[in-house]
Image (cartoon, rainbow, N blue to C red):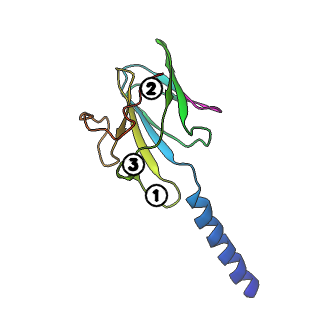
């Protein structure tokens, strides 16, 4: 019985600590008018126009590449403030939306996608290619 209790306690601690250090999820919505590929240092994520995709990638920490049939662009970023974050049990989620102007906008998680009013943006957004 004592070992079972210890095992459960260790499992709970591991889940809590593991959740605290989990990489955030980015729900990336493509409103650019064309199919795109979002690329981190390790993986590529294909996203059709009008679709969203959840991206969880430890190598997507401060830069990404977005390419389409029209070419490619590189972006640097920091995560937006807390008001743009959906807090989850094991992972937080940010919502980003690529527009036809090539900029990536932060979207509050309560907004229905595609977002239409993107005028208000947190510091560092919209992301622009460099």
Q: Which residue is mark 2?
A: 48
Q: Are marks 3 and 2 in contact (CB under 8 Å)?
A: no
Disc assigned to residue 88: 1
Of tags 2 and 1, the one toward the viewer is 1
Q: Is residue 114 left or right of 52 when viewed as pictured?
A: left
Q: Which residue is mark 3?
A: 81
Q: Residues within 10 Å of mark 2 (few under 14, many from 20)?
A: some
Q: Residues within 10 Å of mark 1 (few under 14, many from 20)?
A: few
Query: Residue 122 location in percent, x, y?
Result: 34, 41
Q: Residue visible at 66% across and 77% down?
A: 9
Front residue of 65/70: it is: 65
Compared to residue 54, the image places residue 51 above or below, namely: above
Which residues are the magenta region?
39-45
Front residue of 38/53: it is: 38
Q: CA distance from mark 3 to mark 1?
A: 15 Å
Query: Residue 80 location in percent, x, y?
Result: 41, 44
Query: Residue 34 location in percent, x, y?
Result: 41, 19
- The first of marks 3 and 2 along the sequence is 2
Q: Residues within 10 Å of mark 3 (few under 14, many from 20)?
A: few
Compared to residue 120, the image places residue 23 above or below, namely: below
Whether the magenta-drawn stretch holds residue 88 is answered as no
Of tags 3 and 1, the one toward the viewer is 3
């Amino acid at each position: 019985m004592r070992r079972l209790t210890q095992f459960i306690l260790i499992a709970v601690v591991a889940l809590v600590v593991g959740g605290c250090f989990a990489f955030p999820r980015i729900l990336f919505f493509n409103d650019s008018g064309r199919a795109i590929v979002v690329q981190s240092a390790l993986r590529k994520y294909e996203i059709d126009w009008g679709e969203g995709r959840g991206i969880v990638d430890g190598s997507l920490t401060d830069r990404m590449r977005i390419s389409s049939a029209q070419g490619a662009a590189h972006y640097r970023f920091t995560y937006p403030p807390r008001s743009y974050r959906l807090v989850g049990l094991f992972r937080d989620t940010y919502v980003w939306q690529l527009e036809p102007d090539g900029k990536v906008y932060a979207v509050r998680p309560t907004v229905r996608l595609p977002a239409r009013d993107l005028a208000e943006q947190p510091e560092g957004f919209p992301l622009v290619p460099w």
